[in-house]
């Protein structure tokens, strides 16, 4: 292991840790030596992840609740005594014909995908300033291109890029680092639960499907680890696209 990616003695909070990219990120951080605090709304999956990582701690929380966001950060710091990395991985997507999108689903998409990372960052930044720590947000290839039937999801993920860059500029004179990764489609529970809208045009959906297939979850998790570790010291306000060329043109 490179010394630069050694997270020994450091603490990372990972949201969406019950499955998919969140779980893989937690495993990558743990293998690098970090103590990990795991958060997800899925209690069963969260328990499975916690069972894979010795010395981890976990908390079931619905991050659409702003108060819950502040509490999980406080709990992580109380448990491990510090915080070095906040990895905002939790996310969801509802596909719908825009005129038919229920407001409740629009609101939950924005709450989980955008508001939660903002509020978690608010709570985490004072602690991360003490440790020269890092925030890593998970955006999407949908942060850069329009995707049919995904207006709410695209809005939330475009927002993540703007939030990442704005916070990075705000803390330009501080040692904290704030970055994002933007993966293309991955084989996760989100993909497994893909439900196309009634009457959708699959030709439009294929326009944002990569010619090279899906992205490996492990590759994205390893990039999150790099950005969270000292190996990512040169990154600030960046968004790393890992999409096998979907957004290239």
Image (cartoon, grey):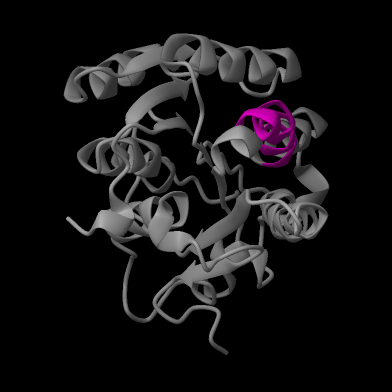
Quick check: 155 above or below 246? Answer: above
Question: In the picture, which quadrant includes the C terminus?
Answer: bottom right
Residue at 76% across / 57% down in the picture?
Answer: 173
Residue at 49% across / 62% down in the picture?
Answer: 233
Position in image of residue 82 (x %, y %): 50, 23
Q: Is residue 15 magenta?
A: no
Left or right placement of residue 135 versus residue 56 in this view = right
Residue at 30% across / 19% down in the picture?
Answer: 56
Q: Is residue 62 visible?
A: no
Chief secondary structure of the magenta span? helix
Question: In the picture, which quadrant includes the N terminus?
Answer: bottom left
Left or right placement of residue 110 versus residue 85 in this view = right
Report how many numbered discs are placed on residues in the image: 0
Residue lying furthest bottom: 249
Residue at 60% across / 59% down in the picture?
Answer: 200
Q: Is residue 125 magenta?
A: yes
Foreground pick, 234 / 120: 234
Quarter assignment of residue 245: bottom left
Quarter assignment of residue 12: top left
Position in image of residue 30 (x %, y %): 26, 35
Quick check: 116 above or below 97? Answer: above
Quarter assignment of residue 23: top left
Q: Is residue 5 visible?
A: yes
Foreground pick, 152 / 54: 54
Q: Which residues are magenta?
A: 114-127
Position in image of residue 93 (x %, y %): 58, 43
């Amino acid at each position: 292991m490179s010394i630069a990616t050694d997270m020994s003695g450091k603490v990372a909070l990972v949201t969406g840790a019950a499955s998919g990219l969140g779980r893989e990120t937690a495993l990558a951080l743990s293998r690098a030596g970090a103590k990990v605090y795991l958060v997800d709304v899925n209690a069963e999956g969260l328990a499975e992840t916690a069972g894979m990582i010795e010395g981890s701690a976990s908390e079931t929380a619905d991050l659409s609740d702003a108060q819950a966001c502040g509490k999980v950060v406080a709990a992580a710091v109380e448990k491990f005594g510090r915080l070095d990395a906040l990895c905002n991985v939790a996310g969801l997507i509802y596909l719908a014909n825009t005129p038919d999108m229920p407001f409740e689903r629009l609101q939950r998409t924005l709450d989980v995908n955008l508001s939660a990372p903002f509020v978690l960052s608010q709570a985490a930044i004072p602690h991360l300033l003490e440790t020269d720590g890092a925030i890593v947000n998970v955006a999407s290839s949908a942060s850069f291109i329009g995707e049919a039937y995904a207006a709410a999801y695209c809005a939330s993920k475009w927002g993540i890029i703007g939030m990442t860059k704005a916070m990075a500029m705000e803390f330009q004179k501080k040692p904290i680092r704030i970055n994002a990764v933007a993966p293309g489609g991955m084989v996760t529970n989100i993909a497994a639960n893909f439900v196309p809208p009634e009457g959708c045009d699959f030709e439009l959906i294929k326009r944002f499907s990569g010619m090279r297939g899906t992205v490996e979850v492990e590759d994205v998790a390893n990039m999150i680890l790099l950005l969270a570790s000292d190996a990512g010291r040169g990154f600030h306000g960046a968004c790393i696209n890992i999409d096998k060329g979907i957004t290239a043109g």
